[in-house]
Image: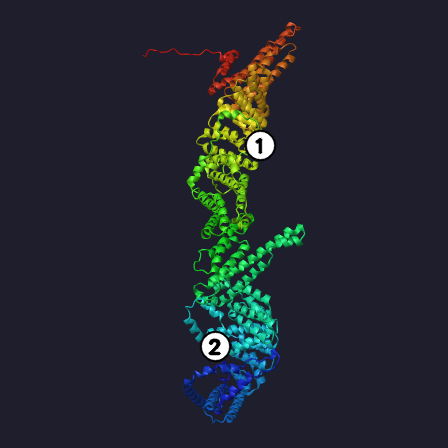
Amino acid sequence: MKHKHASAMNPFTDIKYKPKVKPLAVLITTSLLFACSSSEHGEQDYSNQGRATLGQMAEQRQGDANLQANNQQALANARLSENQRRQKLAAIYSELLLTEPDPTTRSAVEYRLVQLDTESYEHDSLAALDQIDSDPNANAELILASDAKALNELVTDYESLLKRYPSRPENQQIQYQLAKAYELQGNQQKSLSEIESLLSRYPNSIYLAELNFRRGEIYYNQKQYAQAYDAYKQVIAAPNGDKYRLNSMYMSGWALFKQARLYQADNQFLAVFDAMIDLHESSPSALKANTTGTDSTDSQTAAKTADFSFETLNQQFQNIAIDTQRVLSISLSQQLQAESLVQLITDNQDAKHLSRYQHILFDNLAKFLLSKQLPTDAERAYEAYVDLAPNSVWAARYSLALLELYQTQGKFAAMRALKQNYVTRYGLDSEFWLNANDDIRTELIPQLLSFSEQEGRRRYAYAQSINANASADAKKTTPASEVSQATEQTFVSRVDAFANAADALKVYLELVEVSQSKPFAKANLYTNDLLQDKYLYADANFEARRYHVALATYQEIAYPVMTQASEEQRKLQRQAAYDATITVRKDIDLLKLSEFKQFRAVTSDTHLAQQRLRDQLDDQFISHYSDDKRALALAAVAAELAFKAEKPQRLMHYADFLLLKHGVITKQDSSVDERNKLIVANLAPLMTTTIASINTNKTGDAGTDAKFDFADQVAKQPTAQSIAQSTARSADLLSTSSSSQVDAQDMWQTRISYNPTYIGRIRKAQQLTAANSNNSNLSGAALKQVQLASQLYAHQQYQLGLYAQAESAYALALNFTQNEPSNNKEMRNLLASSIYQQGQETKSEQPLVAVEHFLRLGEQIPESDYRANAEFEAADILLSQQQWQQGADLLKVLALRYPNNPMSASIPAKLTQSYESLERWDLAAEQLLVIIASADEADVALKREAQYTAADYYLKAGDRDNALKHFRTYAHSYPQPFDIAQEVRFKMSEFYREDGETNKMHFWHRKILSAHKQEVHNGTSFTTRNKQLASSAAFELGQAHKQSFEWVKLTHPLPKSLKRKQKQMKLAIGYYQQVLDLALAERVPQATYQLAQMYRILAADVMDSQRPTDLDELALEEYEILLEELAYPFEEKAIEIHESNSQRAWQNVFNQWVEKSFSALAEMTPALYQKQELTHDVIETMY
């Protein structure tokens, strides 16, 4: 059998009526509306607030039904044809029952008849509805009664079938129809029981979603909210519940709300919002709109999302959306309000569309709380959203709503903080601004401008209110020990306050710039005086010690000079121009502070750039405002700074400017050529000296504190102390200028000492002839100017590397410092430096000229700190030029003149070099001994080498006694290096060999062998020379003991004298054995021969020994035999050793000692070795 599923929005359209019953669809609709609107309304408790009924939601969809009006006639015709078919089938099945078929067939027919009756009921109900709608004369009462009767008959049929055939598979549908029929009759309890039974019997029923929805509605109407919630959950989880899911989600939220499970209800309401948006966007109209707008930009998409509203959803969702928003606000108000909403949002971050509508929820809550006269709670709602989504445009909009609430309640501190946060969160540097489109930016700019300007001016006013002269008040009210600390704290507070003001004004000006840019200019968002705003910003930065920022802003205001500006603006530009010159100096001073470098990247290029800018700003102010009294002070400082920058032309320009302004010179005097003529015409020749003067003035010790690198240090610039003092005098001279010193103290107060930078002017030649007459003709101020001119001119020449000119200029400057001892001393030292530098310049190309410069320095300025260095350098140059005698003579003078100077330590080495080159070996040796005496104990290598060289030099000089003395010292003091030590020992042995002092000679031989044995023990590898020395020493000692052996005579009693002889023999053998061990070819045959001869001599001496006198002839004969037996082994040993020596001939070693061994063997064993050589006659004739 076929079955048609009922519509979700009209659940009874599947119920079929019998043909004989007249249907009434009005009854169906009325009953449905009644069932869906049975909840209570009008209760004061929010927990009992009524929800929107399904009937009301059905009304929303009525309009959609009107769209099908054109098809109604066709549908009616189709229904009529279908109904006629059902009536014919019902008649056939009824007749079939009269034939009393078998039970199976009968039950099937009865089920089919009930199905046809149900379909007929549905058809007749719709027809009746059409009749009532179209015929105003229709009897609705009669139709209602007829329809109720038909419905009762259907219920009876359903109940009968289920009772008679409890196991039929069709019973699921019959039971489903019965449950709906009960509900239509208004019997909800029976309908609920039937639904529960159906779900129990058929847990996977195809009606699962619809049945659970019916359960939920019934339970909700009965106020059994827990059971209703469980039923709605079943619908939401059902796989076929799409038609009921949204309503079930909505109703489950209400069921939770009614149970006071508010947090769970809130979560469910959020799910309803997401579901509605999904359904809306999947609708044909939404899909069409999305397809049309596929080319929209990301910013347009973001804007569309930001402007989302539930009012944009399809009409069918409007009531649910409105009611869900309302109940959610009620629920949150009964909890922790904004805090609960934030928690709800946080816990549902994975919700698909939450970010699109969450701002609406906060606004709803705030407005609801305001409606309940709870403004503070409403504030918290807006604040919570701003904190939750600070980068949302709604956060910016709600901030303005908050501002209104604060203002209404007089919360001015909160208003100020909110405005600050507004600028921070939505200003140019914010993430929000970077992602916003131009429309949103245009919306925000007016508030950003207003708030940032207010904040900047407020901070500036506060900074000004901090007492800038707090030190005076501190002295009155604070103990003396705490005054400086209190003043410092006030200063820091003031600087910090202005820094805060500058930061705020910077934000404001950046917004002004943006407001005047292309996308926003047409809106005319900025109307203030830009120069005034910029000047305020520059001043704030200046007071905050942010000089580089203030400087840039002052420049921007000052230049170019506006010709069409108002008087007020022109004054502002002039002041900004002067402020720029002050500020650049402040910035340069600040860059010098090491602690400042952690806040700003500072390099040498930074310093140079700022110095160039300072000069440029000075030029601009003096050029544009030369009539301003402040221009004179700037010119004076600019001139001195030009000197420091080594810009002589610039310095001359400003020097002329100042002197002309004060009437000191005329324009003719300011000519560069004229000035040079004045200098040259009045310079007197200076003294010179020669190398011949080095033997004079040998007293004094002016160079005690000199350093080896002094020459490198002074090559760069004059001494820092003298230049700094000269600079200070320059400042003193400037301070005498009368009205030109406005703000001069401010310029100089933070200056750090540096080299002078002011090229001097030389007055007329008539004024510069003699120091005494010049001093008497000049006033105090004029004299200071002359001093300044001459001294700084000399400084400039020095810095330019024109040392000859600098020497002349310093000599001239000295004419004006006679009455100032300290200044005179400085000038003389600078004069000495100039001479010294001339020596430095010429020493590579003209070294002997450099020597003259260095030596005349001491003659002219004997007290100078440069003298010692100059004279030592002169000595070095003489040595480098191989002027050995002159260099040595100068070094001897320097040794006497500067005994405590560290550079004197090198004199002995340099004298040694000189004497070596002169081949004065004895003098060179003496200097080496000086080096040894002064050398550090730890410098063993130096002392050892010097000791050996000194001994060797004495030997070269023919001073044998000193040579022996110092070789002996070396031999006893330096056992290492081994090679050299052995050679020295050998030399000592040879010295004593020459003197005939055998014992001392053998002493050093034993020293050689002892050292050699020690090195053998240490595992040293020996050279041939090492072995030769050791072998020679051993052989010499062996020979000495052999000689002692030979001297011992064998007397009676023989054993006693033989023992003495054998002792010497043993010692000799030991030394010969060492020779053999060393295995040198030139020594081994000789030692072998001597060793064999000792045995031969011993055998012969035994036989020649003294006989006892008291023996008779027989005893004497026995004694002779005894002697032969005693001598025989010695003779055999001698033969054996000689034979071993002779065997070397077969190894291509044949010398006199091998030959002597052959001779000895011929004598000792003539049978073997005394044979005549056999030869053959020569055949001279050939046969």
Identify the mark nearer the N-term, 1 or 2: 2
Residue 314, numbered circle: 2
Q: How crowded is the residue under tag 2: few (<14 C-alpha within 10 Å), some, or many (20+)?
A: some
Q: Determine whether 1137 is above or below 342 in the image.
A: above
Query: Looking at this view, is 456 or 1132 the one in front?
Result: 456
State the image coordinates of residue 512 (x, y, percent, origin top left): 48, 62
Outermost residue toward the right in this view: 479
| Amino acid at pointer 1 | Thr
Q: Rounded to the nearest whole Å, what is the CA distance between mark 1 and mark 2? A: 103 Å
Q: Is residue 597 visible in the rendered structure shown here?
A: no
Question: What count of labels does the image hold?
Answer: 2
Corner quadrant of residue 419: bottom right
| Amino acid at pointer 2 | Asn
State the image coordinates of residue 830 (x, y, percent, origin top left): 52, 36
State the image coordinates of residue 236 (x, y, percent, origin top left): 53, 75
Q: Is residue 46 visible in the rendered structure shown here?
A: yes
Outermost residue toward the top in this view: 1113
Corner quadrant of residue 329: bottom right
State the image coordinates of residue 500 (x, y, percent, origin top left): 56, 58
> In percent of the image, x 42 and y 39: which residue is there?
674
Mark 1 = which residue? Answer: 704
- Quarter of the picture containing the C terminus is top left
Query: Looking at this view, is 118 or 268 the one in front?
Result: 268
